[in-house]
Amino acid sequence: MAHNESLVALNGTQISHIGHDCTDIPDFLGDTYGQFARRLDLSFNLLRSLAGLKMFTVLEELVVDNNLLGNDLLLPRLPNLHTLTLNKNQLTDIEALLEHLADVTPSLVYLSLLGNEACPNQLVSPDNDEDDYQRYRYFVLHKLPQLKFLDTRKVTQKEMMEAQARGAFMKVVKPKSEAQTAIRKKENSLCTTERRKYPPNETGSESHPLPYTPLPRGSRDAKNHKGVFAKCRYIYYGKHSEGNRFIRNDQL
């Protein structure tokens, strides 16, 4: 027990067990500190489960940044928890997470999800923009209207009004891997059908088909391309461009 306690930083009711690569909350933490710990920091571990929190009956603040927590995350009921930071984990399903938190953390007022795919900001992907992030905030506030602070910003009255009015429709949806796989299979099937329809000299080789083009089959072969030339009579009627100097009088 003495060796285990040497891995813990204790400051009054604040407990820190950081950077020990544990995949579950060690039993000795709950047995020793669960009855009085109000703040618990388990950052920089390899946590995949928070089941051990059931021993922390008076917990108010929980920090579990930089772990491996995923969509199967389950917390025990923590009626006094007001601060939760889950930054840089593996959370992707924002709706399921928020519904779970609404059920087990009724006093929650501060939540941070930065660095998770569920939080569409530029920390996760440069493809995300401020509009994506703002819609995410509206959706979170719709699900958890008691929040006062989300990620790095205080919740404003304007955000709360927008969340109440339209937050239910603001969920940022990204294609799931299963859907992407189905799309790729469909595309591959269409390519196979196209190759069967046209001989290799019209669609390219079997291993390197030519890209799609709306041109007729006879025009797809670069060696057999036919062009059409014709005169185009164009009359410019503008009055405020130097282009007028190139228009002959008989064209005006």
Image: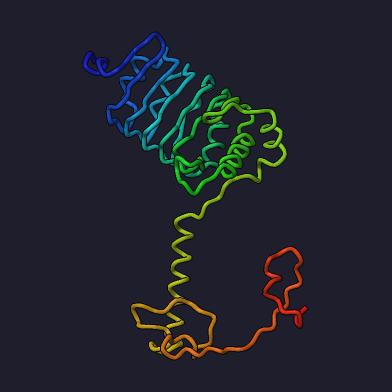
Examine the rendered structure and indicate whether residue 49 appears above or below residue 224. above
Residue at horizontal 43 percent and vertical 17 percent from the top: 39
Q: Picture quarter containing residue 157? A: top right
Residue at horizontal 52 percent and vertical 31 percent from the top: 151
Quadrant holding the C terminus = bottom right
Residue 101 screen position, x and y as percent: 54, 32
Quadrant holding the N terminus = top left
> Does 107 sit left or right of 165 as displayed?
left
**Which residue is most to the top?**
12
Examine the rendered structure and indicate whether residue 50 appears above or below residue 79. below
Q: Nearer the viewer, residue 155 or 185?
A: 155
Residue at horizontal 41 percent and vertical 11 percent from the top: 13
The number of callouts visible is 0
Q: Picture quarter containing residue 41? A: top left
Q: What colour scheme does the image use?
A: rainbow
Residue 166 screen position, x and y as percent: 70, 42
Q: Nearer the viewer, residue 132 or 182?
A: 132
Residue at horizontal 64 percent and vertical 36 percent from the top: 142
Residue 113 screen position, x and y as percent: 48, 34
Examine the rendered structure and indicate whether residue 252 appears above or below residue 19. below
Q: Nearer the viewer, residue 129 or 14?
A: 129
Residue 170 screen position, x and y as percent: 63, 44
Q: Picture quarter containing residue 108? A: top right
